[in-house]
Image: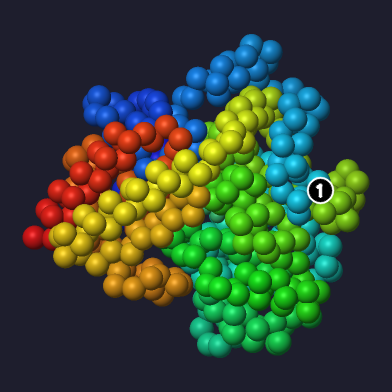
Amino acid sequence: MVGGVNSPVRAFRAVGGEPVFIERAEGANVFDVDGNRYVDMVGTWGPAIVGHAHPAVVEAVKKAAENGLSFGACCAAEADLAEIIVEALPSVERLRFVNSGTEATMSAIRLARAAVGRTKIVKFLGCYHGHVDALLVAAGSGAATFGVPDSAGVPPSFAEATLLAPYNDLTAVEKIMKEHGMDVAAILVEPVAGNMGFVRPVGGFLDGLRKLCDRHGSLLIFDEVMTGFRAAWGGYQNTCGVRPDLTCLGKVIGGGMPVAAYGGPRSIMEKVSPLGPVYQAGTLSGNPIGMAAGIATLRICRENGFYTKLYANIRRLVDGLDGAARQAGIALQTDAEGGMFGMALFNRPVRNFDDAKACDHGLYARFFRAMLDRGVWLPPSGYEVMFVSSAHDKAAIDQVIDAAREAFRSVAS
Ligand code: KE4
């Protein structure tokens, strides 16, 4: 395997040392091949919201598997999961299941371009939407904010149709839309950014994007692959009250299986094949095993008080981390939404990618190692967020706080 991994962040390049191989996971814990137990704060990057190997999820997957792994045909489970999602998200009347967040955002921007009849997409520096060619772009030179490829193999022509603005900078977006609005098919945004650490939208930012899209006839796409059913039941749009035109989902809706989706109003979604001219397809889309895992997971999330309890646990954890850093004299910023939170080694709240890059990533790498040595599995990069599951009980939270107290002290010296 290239670099020993199947996704780059797992290679520990940002934190140093050899990547750990995990052998099994259960509840709030993961266990490596040497038998070490870690309290898991990565949650396989979000999906494990009910804890690993939850009996109800495992049972549902086992049962479905006994009837075959994939049919390549319609099955009731697809409709069952679709109904749960459509009921949870008023902005989603129709959806299409795909197999990864990348597929969801790639399909959503293709659909937006067809629906609006325009080419340009606006995205934000520091937001990640999967490895879609048109979205692997960095800020170009000059004020034009045209994208330049941020990966080898992406033709400049693919990047040129992507315009970039700093997250939380509505003035920059207004300027882009004033100049290019008539060519912009969509503005694509993570409603809470989770790929440059945790960056909360400042007041009026998301609402401002909504207004700009309405003024210029562009679509607003919320990439809720991470925040969907993680930040809140349905997604962050149900918390912030800003209604996107299209929503991308993933992670939690598959409960750990490769399931993602994109959706929106009938008027837009019915442009997707076979009803409309926008082609998109997938051998394993909506497969019964993924659907079973997603249904079992969301049924647990739908239980009364699930998110309230999750958030109370995260609040206790974040307050503990704040106290531990303060005791060690380390500047720490924390923030949390629903079942996700972030920590930044910075002296003020992180508002955009420039702030995120200015954080002390060297210190984070040392903190990561100190926590790993104390049985806590953090994301191996300071540009990620952390996740708590309903399986993280008081003991697990206390273990993380105690470890952080020692780890902050050890890296501060
Ligand atoms: P996938 O293609 O990895 O399923 O989803 C891409 C994606 C889309 N949108 C958002 C907001 C995302 O966070 C992601 C993927 N998230 C990363 C972690 N931040 C996945 C981890 C990895 O790349 O290994």
Q: Residue at x 65, y 54 (%)?
A: 238
Up the image or down, 285 lies above or below 324; here it is: above
Name the residue nearer the viewer: 398 or 26: 398
Name the residue nearer the viewer: 316 or 17.
316
Q: Relative to residue 92, is residue 53 depicted above or below?
A: above
Residue 18 picture quarter: top left
Residue at point 65%, 65% (across, down): 188
Q: Residue at x 44, y 38 (%)?
A: 389
The amino acid type found where label 1 is placed reads Glu
Quadrant of the rendered structure where residue 196 is? bottom left
Residue that mark 1 sits on: 93
281 on left or right of 399: right
Quarter of the image that includes the C terminus: bottom left
List x then y, in percent, for residue 162: 64, 71
Residue 380's place in the image compared with 166, above or below, is above
Residue 101 makes an appearance in the image: no
Q: Position of residue 351 (x, y in %)?
A: 45, 72
Q: Nearer the viewer, residue 70 or 360?
A: 360
Determine the residue positioned at 62% across, 31% down. 299
Number of callouts in the render? 1
Q: Quadrant of residue 347?
A: bottom left
Residue 374 at x, y percent in the picture? 19, 40
